[in-house]
Amino acid sequence: MGKIKFVIKRTGAIVPFNPDRITNAIYRAAVAVGGRDKEKAEELGRQVVAILEEKFEEGYKPHIEEIQDIIEKVLVENGHAKVAKEFILYREEAARRRKADSKHFSKPSEFIPWAKVWRSLDWAVSHNLHTISAINERIRAGEFPHVVHECENLYETQLDTAAEMIKERSKDLKMVFVSGPSSSGKTTTTIKLEKRLNKLGMSFKPLVVDNYFFDLEMHPKDEFGDYDFETPQALDLKMINEHLKLLAEGKEVKIPYYDFKTGKRFLEKTSLQLKENEVLLIDSLHGLFPAFSQEIPANLKFKLYLEPLLQMKDSDNRYIRWTDLRLIRRMLRDSAHRAYNPEQTLLHWHYVRSSEKRNILPYCSNADYIINTSMSYEVPLYSSKLRSSFAEWEKKYKDDPLRIDAYTRAARVNKVLQEIEPVADDSPVPGDSVLREFIGGSILEYH
């Protein structure tokens, strides 16, 4: 055990020193610029720790900023200027986000599709679904099934619009991207959109982007040592671009296969080629990320962006956060289909969110059309399913300096779920609803 035992976080919390986090930070910066040398990252991490041990006295608690300054210094002195630049840019971005958050919306965020948000709010107000108090009144009046119908109708209408827009461009179109952050409803939307377009005479071939993941051992990790599948650099972007370009030209490619059980990718496993009247359908977190399809001309692509843009206020006049809706959706889906404990989802959501802010949300304005996948009725259903769990998590993490984010989210969501009228019966929800992707009971076949 070295001299450094604890570290001071930006919040002022004192937490145990973990050298692996230094190595992970270096490796993540390297991956962002195309590097995949873990041994070099480990070597540089050891150098950083050695400098910390030499520079500070026994018992000293370095601030996280002091450690990051040394990381920059080590990267530059070892000739890794590109990696150092990426690391510096990441620090600067994080600092800007913290500053913006501290100002409480002093200026509009460029990450928010304001025009779509306004239309969503206008719809919510006109249907008396813009506050928890309002939806509670409707539920108590026995109107829950009608609320479900209104919400589903809005979603289906947006799908109709998207299908019409794609059809209008079908003459030149080679690929359709369905993108959006985690649990925004991409899978269901892709299936339903394809059915609509088939009726309009268009034919599709799916491209499963997960098959382009690098081997697990090459993935960067998060600060808790878990592999990060959320970053676009977890995907072989170079190979994706090469294959998209060839497919757009009508040529045949050999798609790799990624085995999630072993964490290994196998190259050239499945043949894929587009016929003259076929279009590639791509469902991906990172479909709007510039490097994902930078080789493909804009006129050959249609980019659809999904986000649950719920417009509903609580008793404190605060809007329910979209990220909280997606957190709950992912909890329910992962618990049912991936044997993943909902509490684990809460503990790692801050990392999902951090990646979204860097790699997904900034590009929503590049979309050709945006679909609001929120359902006002989903919150009452979640209250029935998870209100006791969030109350428990709020208490559990209240005084844990390592879990400040988990506590903040748990407390915020718990307040909402306690306020809203819980609904246990989900039978009014259609079997092909986007919400069935998360609460279960879908009649659609997910691949």
Image: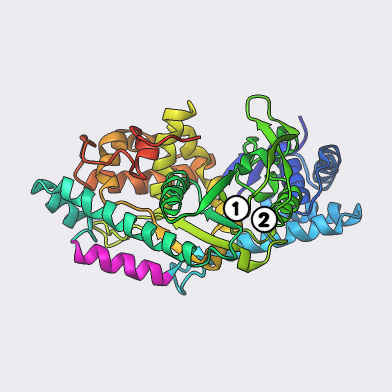
Residue marked by disc 1: 286
Q: Position of residue 253 (x, y in %)?
A: 73, 44
Specify start and end residues of the magenta stretch as a single range: 114-127
Residue at 35%, 46% in the rendered image: 413
Residue at 33%, 55% in the rendered image: 155
Residue at 48%, 67% in the rendered image: 168
> In which quarter of the view is residue 418 placed?
top left
Say if residue 61 shows up in the picture.
Answer: no
Residue marked by disc 2: 292
Q: Position of residue 28 (x, y in %)?
A: 72, 47
In front of the other: 40 or 411: 40
Q: Is residue 78 magenta?
A: no
Q: Is residue 447 left or right of 235 when viewed as pictured?
A: left
Amino acid type assigned to the residue bearing label 1 in the image: His
Image quadrant in which the N terminus is located: top right
**Contact between labelled residues 1 and 2, with CB atoms less than 8 Å apart:** yes
Q: Secondary structure at mark 2?
A: helix
Colouring style: rainbow
